[in-house]
Amino acid sequence: MWYKIVESGEDIGLRTLFYGNGGSRTLATKKWLRAAEKVVHDGSNGTPYTSGWHVLPTKTEAENYLKQFKKDRRERLIVIRVWAQGVYKKEHSRSPVYLAREIYIGKWPDDI
């Protein structure tokens, strides 16, 4: 189990914070979402890395990371629990951020 910061609202559902996937920032639930793997950069001319879903190992770390966003943006951000596969450390990050090749948002498929 991992944690992810997403943008949320009645008018938008769940959305990624920055890069979209397949041309959309909207996140589907109850299905595995595969990251579009491509070379991206943090900030303007930042360190290049292969994209993936940004996830954090604990809810506390995700909540602390969320505090780094500008206050006006934080109003629409929430921390959600996700399941992740193919997780690897985002090497150049100073924060405890990992990248995942796939995520699942919602009740685990085998839960009763």
Image (cartoon, helix red, strand yellow):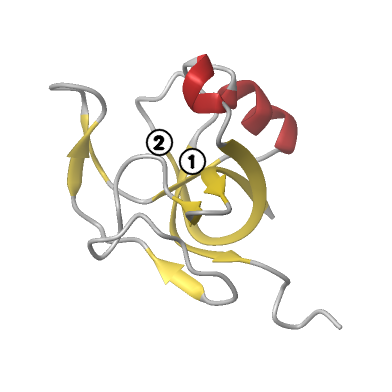
Report the residue marked by disc 1: 98
Q: Quadrant of residue 96?
A: top right
Quadrant housing the N terminus: bottom right
Left or right of 19 on screen, residue 96? right
Kind of residue indicated by mark 1: Tyr
- Is 42 rendered above or below residue 1? above
- Dot 2 lies on which element? loop
- Dot 1 lies on which element? strand
Q: Residue furthest left?
A: 45
Q: Where does residue 77 sit, x and y in percent of width and height?
A: 56, 36
Tell me which label, 2 or 1, sits earlier in the chain.
2
Quadrant housing the C terminus: bottom right
Residue visible at 56% across and 70% down?
29
- Whether tag 2 and tag 1 are in contact, CB under 8 A, the answer is yes
Q: Where does residue 59 sit, x and y in percent of width and height?
A: 72, 37
Left or right of 19 on screen, residue 11? right
Kind of residue indicated by mark 2: Lys
Q: Where does residue 61 sit, x and y in percent of width and height?
A: 66, 28
Residue visible at 60% across and 75% down?
30
Q: Residues within 10 Å of mark 1 (few under 14, many from 20)?
A: some
Q: Residue furthest right?
A: 112
> Residue 90 shows which numbered tag?
2
